[in-house]
Image (cartoon, rainbow, N blue to C red):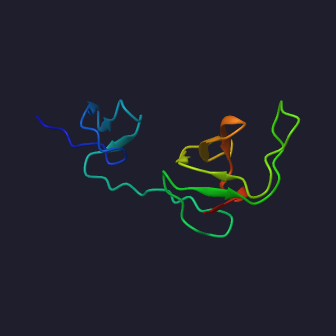
Amino acid sequence: MCLSACPKCSEEYTYRDGELLICPMCGHEWIDGETVQTEVIKDAVGNVLADGDSVTVIKDLKVKGSSTPIKVGTKVKSIRLIYDATDGHDIDCKIDGFGAMKLKSGVVKKA
């Protein structure tokens, strides 16, 4: 029996648990035949963001544990979006001089 690929990440390693299909790669659960409504993440001015986009910080951001803030105009390349963000930080990225961190989409604009 061939199960359908994950509608979220397109991997084919899905398995059945009762009525649900589960993707072990991304953890997405769905009912076979169900359509997936993808969440849209927008920047501070309303532009739709996607994985791999470059963004610019629009206000100074204090960084916990650092004496220097992230300045306005700092460019961040190759962002990754986090759709199930429970803390409001829906962008995962690396910032030169600061390293890996999470940002809120409301403090950036698409570059």
Residue 73 relative to residue 28: left or right: right
89 or 56, which lies in front?
56
Residue drawn at x 57%, y 56% as measured from the top left = 54
Q: Residue furthest front?
A: 97
Q: Residue furthest left?
A: 1
In the rendered view of the protein, which quadrant contains the C terminus?
Answer: bottom right
- 110, above or below 17, in the image: below
Quick check: 1 left or right of 37?
Answer: left
* Side (left or right) of 60 relative to 51: right
- Residue 80 appears at what percent x and percent y? 53, 46
Along the viewing direction, whichever of 65 and 88 lies nearer the viewer: 65
Q: Residue visible at 68% across and 64% down?
A: 44
**Percent coordinates x, y for residue 99 in the rendering:** 67, 34
Q: Quadrant of residue 73?
A: bottom right
Residue at image x 60%, y 42%?
A: 93
- All told, the count of numbered labels is 0
Image-based side of 70 in relation to 43, left or right = right
Q: Position of residue 78 (x, y in %)?
A: 53, 48
Q: Nearer the viewer, residue 68 or 108?
A: 68
- Kindly identify the residue that appears in the image at 68 percent across and 50 percent down: 104
On-image quarter of the N terminus = top left
Expressed as whole percent of the image width and height from the top left, the position of residue 15 reads 26, 31
